[in-house]
Amino acid sequence: MTALAALHARLFGALETRVEPLLMPALARLVFAGTLLIYFWNSGLTKLGEGLAGLFAPSFNAYVQILPRMSESVGYDASQIPAFWRLVVLFGTWAEFILPALLLLGLLTRLAALGMIGFVLVQSYVDIVGHHADPTTIGAWFDAGSGSLILDQRAFWVFLLLYLVLRGAGPLSLDAILSRRQRPQLSAA
């Protein structure tokens, strides 16, 4: 039994020290790109206004999606929404494009993943409070169901993003390239 335990420790120790640092951060970013990148970009596209100016003037949909109660309280007239909240909608719209792109590239990965966690938490709050998500959509942990949109699925999203906050993008990323370039070159003096 001791020999089996030693073999187990050597095998998985080698995986942990040699394979994990290269594979896991890249795999986490690949899973994010394969499952959530297009989801967030498509959501962001529904919020853009018309033409190039739409990058700076979100559509009516943006206000209804991000600020549903406030949009309703002003009779769905976005011009009546205070400037601060218009900026929140603008930056929230941009975040749906910029943060996933940064994660895909592995650039400013820890900050981008932290920003995405905040985004998912705010998104969940808006879905529950602003859009009045029903109990099935909200879900519950430890209930034998695994398909609720908010508590089940988004827990996995946040876990994946938290991994990237803690571990970074890994050696196959722009973060790693920039880090190597910024290290001082040691001279052979």
Image (cartoon, rainbow, N blue to C red):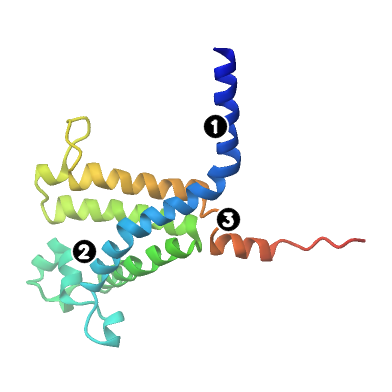
Left or right: 85 as drawn, with respect to 136: right
Task: Indicate the quadrant containing the C terminus: top left, top right, bottom left or bottom right.
Answer: bottom right
State which mark lies toward you, 1 or 2: 1
* Viewer-closest of 156 and 30: 30
Query: In percent of the image, x 13 and y 68: which residue is there?
Result: 71
Q: Say the numbered circle drawn on residue 97.
A: none
Point out the tag, 3 or 1, that comes first from the N-terminus. Answer: 1
Can you say which quadrant of the picture contains the N terminus? top right
> In the rendered view, does 103 fall on the left or right side of 59?
right
What amino acid does circle 1 point to?
A: Phe
* Residue 81 drawn at (x, y percent): 19, 72
Q: Position of residue 145 (x, y in %)?
A: 17, 35
Label 3 sits on a secondary structure element that is loop
Three-letter amino acid code at the position of disc 2: Ile
What residue is drawn where x is 56% and y is 44%? Answer: 19
Q: Which residue is disc 2 drawn over? A: 66
Is residue 56 in view?
Answer: no
Give the Cα separation between the discs numbered 2 and 3.
Answer: 36 Å
The mark closer to the camera, 3 or 1, is: 1
Are circles 2 and 3 on residues that touch, CB within 8 Å? no
Residue 85, given in percent of the width and then of the height, sits at 26, 68
**Residue picked out by circle 1:** 12
Give the labeled residue for mark 3.
Answer: 171
Check whether the beta carbons of the residues at disc 3 and disc 1 lie within 8 A of each other: no
Examine the rendered structure and indicate whether residue 94 appears above or below residue 52.
above
Q: Amino acid at mark 3?
A: Pro
Q: How many marks?
A: 3
Neighbour class for label 1 at 10 Å: few (<14), some, many (≥20)?
A: few
Left or right: residue 83 compared with residue 179: left
Q: Measured from the top left, where is residue 15 in percent x and y?
A: 56, 38
Q: CA distance from mark 3 to mark 1?
A: 21 Å
In the rendered view, tell whether residue 22 sits above or below residue 73: above
